[in-house]
Amino acid sequence: MNYKLIDLKGVSSREELFAKIEDGLDLPVYFGRNLDALHDMLAHSDIVLELCGIDELKENLGSYADALCEMLRDTEAESKTFKVIIR
């Protein structure tokens, strides 16, 4: 499994969030920059994804940060190869 760490401190918009995710995961240019597209990319990946700075992200993006966390946990539950650590 590949380990990827993405620091979300300082992210204050959805655009910044997806830019960090794209950079951190080396996603292809056709990535859709939304939670459904991210789920599709991660569901069959061989990645341990660690996100840090989630509390600050929740302060900045509110319910969208909650939706991100929920989607990542759901993806982990559905996948045999994707793991997530949220702190």
Image: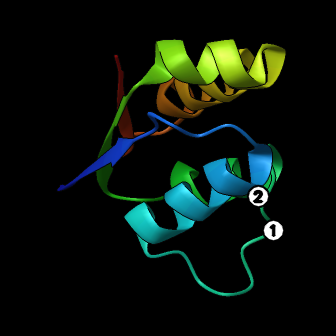
Disc 2 residue type (three-letter)? Ala
* Residue at left offset 37%, top offset 31%: 84
The single residue placed furthest to the bottom in the displayed view is 29
Mark 2 surroundings within 10 Å by alpha-carbon count, few (fewer than 14), some (14 through 19), many (20 or more): few
Question: What percent of the width, then of the height, locates residue 11?
Answer: 58, 40
Question: What percent of the width, then of the height, locates residue 79?
Answer: 48, 39
Please identify the quarter of the rendering in which residue 35 is found: top right
Going by the image, does 64 lie left or right of 16?
right
* Residue at left offset 39%, top offset 43%: 82
- Reading the image, the residue beneath label 2 is 37
* Residue at left offset 44%, top offset 33%: 9
Note whether residue 70 is visible: no
Q: Earlier in the sequence, mark 2 or mark 1?
A: 1
Please identify the quarter of the rendering in which residue 25 is found: bottom left
Q: Nearer the viewer, residue 52 or 9?
A: 9
Q: Quadrant of the N terminus?
A: bottom left
Q: Secondary structure at mark 2?
A: helix
Depicted 13 relative to depicted 16: above or below = above
- Reading the image, the residue beneath label 1 is 32
Question: What percent of the width, then of the height, locates residue 23?
Answer: 46, 70
Q: Secondary structure at mark 1?
A: loop
